Amino acid sequence: MSAYPALRLRRTRATAWSRRLHAETVLTPADLIWPLFIAEGDGVEEPIAALPGVSRWSVAGIVARGREARDLGIPCVALFPNTPHHLRSDDGAEALNPDNLMCRAIRALKDAVPEVGVLTDVALDPYTTHGHDGLVDAAGYVVNDRTADALVRQALNQARAGSDIVAPSDMMDGRIGLIRTALEGEGHVNVQIMSYAAKYASAFYGPFRDAVGSRGLLKGDKKSYQMDSANAEEALREVALDLDEGADTVMVKPGLPYLDIIQRVKARFGVPVFAYQVSGEYAMIEAAVAAGAGERDALVLETLMAFKRAGCSGVLTYHAAHAARLLGA
Ligand SMILES: NCC(=O)CCC(=O)O
Ligand SMILES: [Mg+2]
């Protein structure tokens, strides 16, 4: 009796209570990390045209979003600064300033809502005049080792300000081990490292570059450091190295186009994996909603569930607050 009509898989799907009972995967506000864009100034809210529904906030607004995250049950926020253009330079030195926008936002958040985790991006692109994540040589190549040194200092700067998770998004070789050693050396033993281990050179990052003011600045592309979308075995090598160097958690980015990578990383390593549902993915959902091609709430929850089903511990998404409201705190 192992086939139709005795066996009907529709039986357990027939009612709402039964569908709930048989759900294999759960999605809760605790699965979400909310990326926030910081603006210079006081009482500033700047809507980002390329990301309808997302704004940059000055520090007090960031703190308000932190309280909102707490009230919605979102455990962690991720910070990205829109550095004023006069503070950008070839070497991105503003990233090392202990009073930069990022550090001021970290301190304000940890002061006002210490129970919400703060994840900070380690990379130079919001601070450089050329829009690259690292230091560029005369030929336009992003040099690895000098960049890694700068990233170590940037990560320490963030840890001193109170960052809970430093998240290197630059894809330089070797930086996870160097950052871990430096954090340990200064006693930041419980500051986590979430490595953007498999970050692909992607066409889905456009709206983010508008949000941090680097789109018009970027010279060339990022293909000499971010990964080729053709490659999966290489992603597993990237993850293995970063874990070996001391990453606590790893990220795959972008999200939906790389679900296969998420699943393979989870199956191979069994470590906490996070997805970044990036700006272009957010914008595609919003464009679909605006075009009448889909319904926002359902699109948001279905995509987030896909990440959980693939094996993610959590997802960075610009829809975090909206999703948390739908899911109920
Ligand atoms: N380092 C953070 C990002 O590059 C985010 C990209 C996006 O949301 O498109
Ligand atoms: Mg790597």
Image: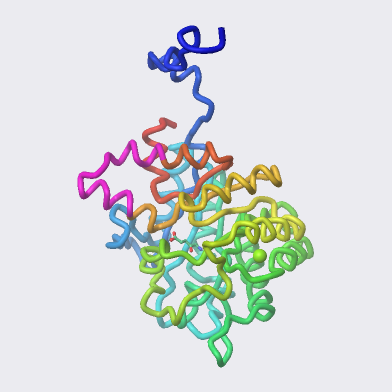
Residue placed most toward the observer, 91 or 19: 19
Residue 38 figure quarter: bottom left
Q: Residue at x 44, y 19 (%)?
A: 19
Position of 269 relative to 157 (above/below): above
Residue situated furthest bottom in the rendering: 138
Residue 287 in picture, x, y percent from top left = 27, 52
Residue 190 or residue 313, whichever sits in front: 313
Q: How many marks?
A: 0
Residue 110 in the image, given as x and y percentages of width and height: 55, 52
Depth order, front residue of 81/249: 249
Residue in view at x 59 percent, y 75 percent = 96
Q: Which residues are magenta?
A: 284-302
Residue at x-position 52% and y-position 30%: 25
In magenta segment, residue 287 = yes
Residue 144, above or below 16 = below
Colour style of the rendered protein structure: rainbow
| Residue 162 is at least partly visible in this image | no
Q: Is residue 167 left or right of residue 70?
A: right
Residue 77 seen: yes
Q: Does 243 sit left or right of 92 as displayed?
A: right
Q: Main secondary structure of the magenta part?
A: helix
Residue 77: x and y in percent read: 50, 50
The quadrant holding residue 240 is bottom right
- Left or right, 15 with reference to 192: left
Q: Is residue 51 magenta?
A: no
In front: 112, or 295? 295
Task: Name the quadrant of the C terminus.
Answer: top left
Question: Does residue 231 lie above or below 17 as drawn?
Answer: below
Indicate the position of residue 303 as horizontal and vertical percent values.
42, 42
